[in-house]
Amino acid sequence: MVWQRPVPLIGDVSAASQRAADPAGWAFPPTQREALYAVMDARRDVRRFRPDSVPADVLERVLGAAHSAPSVGHSQPWRFVVVRDPAVRERAALMADRERLRQAAQLEPDSARRLLDLQLEGIREAPLGVVVCCDRRTAAAGVLGRATFPDADLWSCACAIQNLWLAARAEGLGLGWVTLFDPAELAALLGLPDGMVTLGWLCLGWPDERPPQPGLQRAGWSRRLPLAQVVIDERWPNGDQAPSAPPSHLRAPDQVSVVAAHDAADRLLTPPGSLGVLDRTIDKVVALGHRELAAGTLVLAAADHPVARLGVSAYPIDVTREILAAAVAGEAMGVTAARSAGLAAELVDAGVNGSPVTGVTSLPCLDPRGDLASADAMSARDAQRLVDAGRQIGVRLGAQGLVALGEVGIANTTVAAAMTCALLDVQPDVAVGLGAGADSAILERKRAVVGEALRRARRVHGRALRDPQVVLAALGGPEFAVLAGVVLGAAAARAVVVLDGLATSLAALVAVEFEPAVAACLVAGQRSRERGHDLVLSQLGCEPLLDLRIRAGEGVGACLATATLRQALTIRGATARASY
């Protein structure tokens, strides 16, 4: 007797035998597949639009396509704000115009001119604006899949945008994705509540252009890479076989700005160079476009380090937490110094042992961390994630004009010594110092640990250890990664970045290795007593403003230097000018 398989009335009606007999049986017919690939290939970022309105049924279909996107834990975090009001569109367009000019100012001259020649948005022209928002009001741990990848909700919203884009193209609509916004400004324009994050503005309407190629490719800004350059078999390759990073167009101040700063100084009714090191620093600040530095923030990043278990510090590891808690209360030396220098304080818990410290930005590592000697300090994924998070902080705070750096972390002088050895190719004897309160026995242990850490890292990573990103993960620490990102973000905003001791200078060196133009924004606040600091400052090309043998850390030296720098700017601004 052969029995008939029960076929469900809902769900998957296929049988295992069917799927085994025809593994490709789920495919669409060739004509439909070809149409799908054609739509993907013809998708364009449209900037010019006709004034004709979009019918309601067409809009509903493309928004429905967006709503059918995959989402982490089926959370459907996207929210679509459809904007028709011309007044709101005009305010959004003005915000984008301002940001376009700001971004152009950050680029090398040729790239800046080419950028300004491009039409980067069609906010005024398009009949509809669609702002895609990510509802992040639910904690990551409460959504299946976000506990390990907290940003997967943002990726889900990006999938929704892609669905909307492809559906629009299939309907004959044009869509342009505009990200020339400060996210907080755009959220305020739309009255979004806390916990809602925007992913930019989508211009939607009937296109007044039909570009055969992507706009930036057509304008010679970039080209599509061959597929072989972005596909990697099995694992990331070492050495010359590794794919290169995306190109950067960040620029330092141009020659005209630098010379103009010198010319202005020469007109002062005082001998040239009368303020010594300060004069050169002021010229750097003026070349960046700052005549004064009325506002600024100390970023104090804290983290503990597994290497402390190897006896390399004179203090117990819980001191990091105590200092950060005191900083929250406004009583730690770093935030006190910031307050006296007229700086706000941004506190970051980048990995302090125990539960998250309340009242600070929490950026913990997601993967296991090592003690340098036997395992990498952190995973490459965590290192990149923390740099990216720091970059966002730097961009936000850099708009004020000045960012000072500080750190706290028991045993991080050992971390700093290991990074110095790797980045500058020097021996532990040159880079390992006493740190705070250490004795000769601790010094010997630090040298031994740094030596073993270097041998292990070179054995594991080989030539890749020349890459600052690899050094950051293999021998660095979370606060170093966050601060490197802060430097990158602040430099992109053309802010002045005031460094403190060895740790913050190493974070800046990593940033400079990523983006050489960052060096134009750096001010060495002080020369600390830590061995290796002179070497790192020389590598940065920075001469310190202060040399007070400060060991405090926490950004104290950076805050004192900021106060001195501000006073020097005031002096220069008020000094008489010669008539010639």
Image: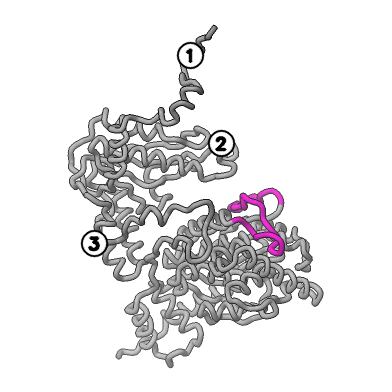
Quadrant in which the C terminus is drawn? bottom left
Mark sitting on residue 117: 3
Instruction: Find the distance from the CA under tag 2 to the CA under tag 1.
Output: 33 Å
Q: Residue at x 37, y 66 (%)?
A: 249
- Quadrant in which residue 482 is drawn: bottom right
**Residue hosting label 2:** 143
Looking at the image, the residue that sits furthest to the right is 441
Q: Residue at x 46, y 84 (%)?
A: 279
Q: Main secondary structure of the magenta part?
A: loop
Of labels 2 and 1, the one closer to you: 1
Question: In screen coordinates, is 119 left or right of 315?
Answer: left
Q: How is the image coloured?
A: one colour
Q: 555 or 205: nearer the eye?
A: 205
Mark sitting earlier along the chain (2/3): 3
What range of the chain is rendered magenta? 354-379
Mark sitting on residue 7: 1
